[in-house]
Image (spheres, coloured by chain):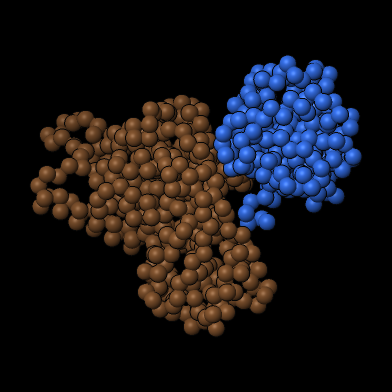
Chain colours: A brown, B blue
Amino acid sequence: MAKELWKGNEAIAEAAIRAGCRFFFGYPITPQNEIPEYMSLRLPQVGGCFLQAESEVAAINMVYGAAGAGARVMTSSSSPGISLKQEGISYIAGAELPCVIVNIVRGGPGLGGIQPAQSDYFQATKGGGHGDYHLVVLAPDSIQEAVNLVQEAFDIADQYRNPVMILGDGMIGQMMEPVEFGEIKKRELPEKTWATTGLRGRKEHNVINSLFIDPAVCEKHNQKIFTKYAEIEKNEVKVEEYNLEGAEIVFAAYGTVARIVKNAIKALEKDGIKAGLIRPITLWPFPKANFFKAADMPGVKAFLTVEMSMGQMVEDVELSVKGKKPVYFYGRTGGMVPTPREIVEEAKKILGGAR
Amino acid sequence: MKKDKRIRIITGHYGSGKTEFAVNYTFKLAEQGCKTAIVDLDIVNPYFRSRQIEPEFEKKGIRVIASSVRGLAGDVPALSPEIYTVLEDKSYQTVIDVGGDKVGARALGRYHDKIEQDDYDMFFVLNANRPLTSDKENAIRYLKSIEQASRQKVTALVNNTHLCGETKIEDILKGQELCLQVSEELGLPIRYTVVHKSLINYLPDNIYGEIFPIDIYMKKPWEM
């Protein structure tokens, strides 16, 4: 198929439909509005259901319902709206239901602004809602990768019966890029025997629930879902390593910031400094092993994490490097985007000290 | 360009490249010595709006009119009263960059009675690589819905078929084919064919309308 020009938000919506998503419940917020807008146009054409809920809280609970009935379902929002959805997300994770949640992140905290940010990293990867649970968090750096990851997200969600989050900074939602919708590599998925679709001759009712009154049962449930998380950590890590060989400094960056860092790496190269990049594509599970290994590379003097936040992923980088090399941080926030020049200067400053 | 009417209204599907065309058009007008103003009427799109390069415009003496609320990052749909100045003051050559689709075009509707019939051109920018306007029926549907919302008639088509940095001559010709079909159906001329400066020498002879070479101003952070 030939390439077409897509806006990130539209492409994410179309990718979901091609992955079999037939239900979308949401509430408008900038900069992700083209997702519900596109869904409202396209879902009726494919026999699906689009519904603009009265609030984000209602929307996420509609997702809970549709997921419980075994449907492929998605919701999307931007930072403040995702905060409102957290209770429902925790319930969905607790009830072990598959769904896809898109967060096109804007500056915060509070209402913040509408320009791109990555300050929801903690919320996405460390819970966000209450209780012990994890979302699988996928962070594309281009529209093409967003399209591929959205399609895979539905399979990951179904395979593990767990919500999956697409975490894109505002730029991912708003920019235009050439995209090719290729064949989706489909996974072999278990049948949804747990879905509440009627008894159909069975004796036992299927029950969708996250309430466990008996503490021993609740603990057992926690242990069960954490066995599942261990599987996910083993199987689902996605990461890009770029230019690591001979690197003196290793950058850590995800999403569109990684593309800016790549330009900084090229600029450093011209000044005779070898730099590399580890770009986590899954933010949870985090590619710990890649950082741990890079920390042992003899030429590597330091790590520099670059984010559009005050420093969030940097903590996972530190945990992965385990103190073997110093880990530094450079960030812009509130909708400001770091420039290659700023990143180059920061790297030189660090290497000046580390040499 | 000087043959175009005094007020140039740039419309199209979002992502068609309206803003890039509007911005290039404005700079060219100013280069030709015109007293030029650009109105950023885009209250739909939060990113990649012409107002974000306001300093570059001002360096060239171009008057920029955007939101009455200062600060370029807002998504407050507030229009500036200054817009009336450049619609009424005939010493200005005015470019209006309208938001995408009929939703964006609605903002233009309120100026319906301030724009004289023989004083404006309204360009419909078409990109055949945009999936929702890649065939004749859909392109015409978008064009009509924009006319209805803006209460103005499109006067000409602009072929702006591209794929960002991956544009090939075949893309431009594919867009021309689509523009010809729309042109035939609606009786509208193809006024410009937009092409990035780097491709200009590769264009064949059979290009409709004036060839309009552009630079890219609406850059992504890693393209700077």
* Image quadrant occupied by the N terminus of chain A: top right
* Image quadrant occupied by the C terminus of chain A: bottom right
Q: Residue at x 51, y 32 (%)?
A: A38
Please state if A236 lies on the left or on the right of A269 as rendered.
left
The x, y position of residue B5, in whole percent, is 84, 26
Q: Residue at x 86, y 29 (%)?
A: B91
Q: How many marks overall? A: 0
The x, y position of residue B32, in whole percent, is 89, 40
Q: Residue at x 63, y 39 (%)?
A: B70
Front residue of this view, candidates A11 and B9: B9
Q: Is A187 above or below relative to B151?
A: below
The x, y position of residue B215, in whole percent, is 77, 48
Front residue of this view, candidates B219 and B168: B219
Answer whether residue A241 is visible to the viewer in this image: no
Front residue of this view, candidates A334 and B209: A334
Q: Residue at x 50, y 69 (%)?
A: A304
The x, y position of residue A60, in whole percent, is 34, 36
Front residue of this view, candidates B158 and B86: B86
Answer whether residue B87 is visible to the viewer in this image: yes
